Image (spheres, helix red, strand yellow):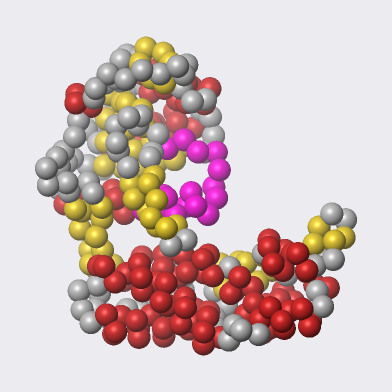
Amino acid sequence: MVRIDHVFHPTLSLDFSKVQSLTLDAAQTAQVAELAPILEGKPDVTNINRIELERLAREFRTQRIIFETARDVFDQMKRDWPGNKELLLAQLVLLVGEVIGSDKIKIDPPLFYQDELRRRLIITLNMSRVVQHIWEAVRYENTERLEPIFDRDHPIRATGEMRTWYTGKPCERTKKSHINVCVFDSTWEASDAFALDESDAVEAWVKNDHLGFEVLYVYRGVVRKYRPDFLVRLVSGDTLILETKGQDAEQDRVKWRHLDEWVQAVNTKGGFGHWRWAVAKAPGEIRDILIKTDATKERG
């Protein structure tokens, strides 16, 4: 699959009860932290000279912040927008203004949230995060349907088409994988490969190495490629996309939201079986995931 296109509702809206809050930390904002006095090895942003804050914030008025944020969200939506582009931008300006003026954008410490100058400055200096947050909210709530776009020349690929390749990394022969050996980038991956080979819920699996299986996602305005760790064909007939990740960072959550959209699009399109996805956040958790996935299928 080349990408997932979004078909949006012609009139955009946001249900603020569904919009998650975004907290911006003033102490983690580089330009502000540089001005702050250091106490006990940490920047004390509450004691920054107000003159310095006014100097930084002088060029950034609220309307400018709203328009620039709306413009950046517009750049990510305009390709999929079938109607009038000016109407799209006008709707985004209104929505962005509502979000930025709401309690959905929080500033830490609270002093920065209560002071309009400080609040405006922190939002400006964290513009890429604010754009990402609003873009995710608008896309999630206003998508009418997801449309998978396939490679015209090679729409379906299989592990049987893999060419021989060589590696100097640690690897081990497998029993259920369609690739004769699995390369291990960590002991965690080695443990997961063993679990997949031994699980009664697994019919076949493969590590996503040299397969070219990628999910495109947008993070802070940049299109990136996400490569999940394993593809698993379950005895139930479902295909499970499995990621092993010990972290739960902002970028990881964005990847998983785009992966969820990918799975929804493929399942809605039909013809490729039923797909699922899961993330193992600790070594050994893969066994529980396989058991739960198998049990869910049986109940369904």
Q: Is residue 227 magenta?
A: no
Q: Residue at x 52, y 25 (%)?
A: 186
Quadrant in the rendering for residue 177: top left
Quadrant in the rendering for residue 74: bottom left
Residue 2 drawn above or below residue 95: above
Q: Residue at x 58, y 74 (%)?
A: 124
Give left or right: position of 69 versus 181.
Answer: right
Q: Residue at x 68, y 78 (%)?
A: 56
Question: Which percent across, then down, holds residue 69?
Answer: 47, 75
Quadrant in the rendering for residue 85: bottom left
Residue 244 visible to an observer of this rendering: yes
Q: Which residues are magenta?
A: 243-258
Residue 133 visible to an observer of this rendering: no
Q: Viewer-proximal residue, 12 or 69?
A: 69
Q: Quadrant of the C terminus?
A: top left
Give left or right: position of 31 versus 213.
Answer: right
Q: Viewer-proximal residue, 68 or 214?
A: 68
Question: Which percent across, then down, holds residue 281?
Answer: 52, 38
Q: Residue at x 29, y 71 (%)?
A: 78
Question: Which percent across, then down, holds residue 298?
Answer: 27, 36
Identity of the residue furthest to the right in this view: 40
Residue 70 drawn above or below residue 254: below
Question: Which percent across, then down, holds residue 264?
Answer: 27, 52
Give left or right: position of 231 versus 111.
Answer: left
